[in-house]
Image (cartoon, rainbow, N blue to C red):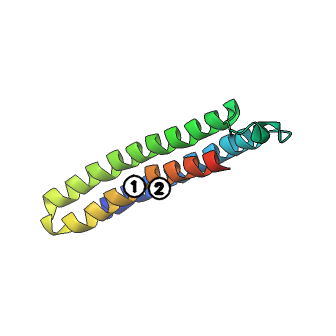
């Protein structure tokens, strides 16, 4: 169980570092793509700028990569813990699910950037 917790904490630290770097890179890109006038909106369609599309791609891509890394690390530790003590299966499944939630958070941020 201790090994599982250590792996989970290490994976979360990596994910938080990656999320902060992603936010520092992606948010200025999204802000820079704001149209200067209302000509685009008056034309009837709202197009995403190239920079906003890149920001969305970076956010979603990096969050999915970080979630894959976290699931790999936490999942291997969970399998090791469950092989030694089968009653830890439920707890280890929760840890793996929490690590997988990072990809969903990245997707939500991508949708929010697309709507902004």
Q: Residue furthest top?
A: 50
The residue at 28%/53% (across/down) is 77
> Looking at the picture, how far across and down is residue 11, in whole percent?
43, 52
CA–CA distance in space, label 2 to label 1: 8 Å
Residue at horizontal 52%, vertical 53%? 108
State which quadrant residue 8 falls in: bottom left
Query: Residue at image x 26%, y 61%?
Result: 93
**Residue 113 sits above or below residue 36 on the image:** below
- Residue beneath disc 2: 12
Residue 35, image x and y in percent?
80, 39
Query: Where is residue 95 shown, x and y percent of the image?
Result: 34, 61
Is 80 on the left or on the right of 111, as rendered? left
80 relative to 11 in the view: left or right: left
Which callout, 2 or 1, points to the residue nearer the camera? 1
Q: Look at mark 1 in the image and give the residue it sits on.
A: 99
In-front residue for pair 80/102: 102
Cβ–Cβ below 8 Å for labels 2 and 1? Answer: yes
Res 85 visible: yes
Q: Tell me the number on the disc at residue 1.
A: none
Q: Position of residue 64 (x, y in %)?
A: 45, 43
- x 50%, y 38%: residue: 61
Tell me which corner region of the image, top left, top right, bottom left or bottom right, holds residue 82: bottom left
Query: Which residue is nearer to you in this view: 93 or 32?
Result: 32
Q: Nearer the viewer, residue 75 or 33?
A: 33
Which class describes the residues within 10 Å of circle 1: few (<14), some (14-19), or many (20+)? many
Identify the element where label 2 is drawn.
helix
Whether residue 34 is visible to the viewer of this picture, yes or no, is no
């Amino acid at each position: 169980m201790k090994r599982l917790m250590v792996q989970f904490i290490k994976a979360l630290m990596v994910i938080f570092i990656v999320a902060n770097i992603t936010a520092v890179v992606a948010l200025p890109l999204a802000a820079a793509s704001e149209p200067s006038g209302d000509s685009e909106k008056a034309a009837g369609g709202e197009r995403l700028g190239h920079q906003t599309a890149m920001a969305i791609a970076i956010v979603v891509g990096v969050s999915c990569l970080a979630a894959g890394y976290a699931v790999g690390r936490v999942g291997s530790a969970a399998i090791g813990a469950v092989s030694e003590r089968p009653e830890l299966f439920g707890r280890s499944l929760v840890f793996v699910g929490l690590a997988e939630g990072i990809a969903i958070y990245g997707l939500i941020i991508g949708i929010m950037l697309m709507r902004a």
